[in-house]
Amino acid sequence: MKATHTDQLELLELQKLDQKESALRHKRDSHPAHATVREFAGRVADLQRAAISQNAIIADVGREIARIEDEIAKVSERRKRQQGRIDNNQVPLRDISAMEHEIAQMDRRLAKLEDDQVEAEERVEAARAAQDKMKAEAQAIAADIEHLKAEFEADVAESDEELRRVIAARRALADRLPHSLLEEYEDARRRNGALAVIEVRDGYGIGVAADLSPMELERIRLTPADELYLTEDTSQIVVRTAANTPR
């Protein structure tokens, strides 16, 4: 395709801007703060899940306490009733011994139930304390995350400003180029990544272009200056320059 030599030279600058943008974005995306924030966020999520799981423990033990309290109330009521019968001389003499034995059994049962109740209530308190500790730790880590984010933004502020300038310069340069040439450049980028454009200076390949064969370099030399040349093997755009070409 046809393209003025001036426009072809602009492709080298466009590629430099793209490479710079890519480097700045990589610097931002690979900042160690990202890994730390992800790690901290994972710990917060784990703590939040663990805190929620304590609700199930509290609910289960709460039901256990309710059952114990219900049984204590029933046993206490029966003991009171049986003791009242003895106190009011309502029990035949032959049955008093058996009833006193039953009351003693109920006393032992009540003592066991009360111990179970205390132990269950302690488990509830322990679960609530653990839950409160998890919530507090999660809040503290969440605060650390916000602090890290603020440090990150401060750390990348200068490079972000540079990135905005590069993006603006790239947009302005792309707007000046013919649409067809820009499309050809974008196609070359899709094929070759950051090395869509290579430079041949005074007939010699620069950088990766140094691998071009003498035969291809000759074809490049014979190609009119206003004709875009694509390498045979990789379809990279070749921009021809001279030692005195403004850089």
Image (tube, rainbow, N blue to C red):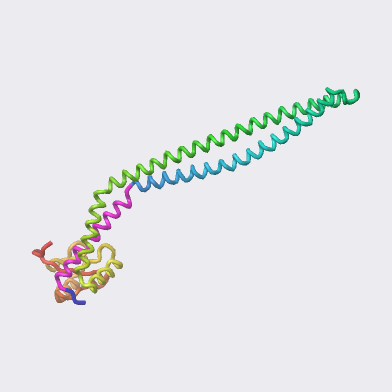
Q: In terms of depth relative to the viewer, which is nearer, 204 or 90?
A: 90
Predominant SS of the magenta segment? helix
Figure quadrant of residue 200:
bottom left
Horizontal and vertical percent for residue 40? 41, 44
- Residue 20 versus residue 60 in the image, above or below: below
**Residue at screen point 28% across, 48% down:** 156
For this view, does 167 lie left or right of residue 67?
left
For this view, does 221 lie left or right of residue 67?
left
Q: Is residue 22 on the magenta stretch?
A: yes
Q: Is residue 189 on the magenta stretch?
A: no
For this view, does 189 lie left or right of residue 55?
left
Magenta segment, which residues? 4-31
User: What quarter of the picture does the C terminus occupy?
Assistant: bottom left
Horizontal and vertical percent for residue 7? 17, 70
Horizontal and vertical percent for residue 234? 27, 69
**Residue at screen point 21% across, 72% down:** 178
- Residue 238 versus residue 169 in the image, above or below: below
Figure quadrant of residue 74:
top right
User: What quarter of the picture does the N terminus occupy?
Assistant: bottom left
Count of numbered tags: 0
- Residue 182 versus residue 68 in the image, above or below: below
**Residue at screen point 22% across, 69% down:** 237
Q: In terms of depth relative to the viewer, which is nearer, 48 or 212?
A: 48
Figure quadrant of residue 137:
top left
For this view, does 168 lie left or right of residue 60?
left
Horizontal and vertical percent for residue 133? 49, 36
Identity of the residue furthest to the front in this view = 88
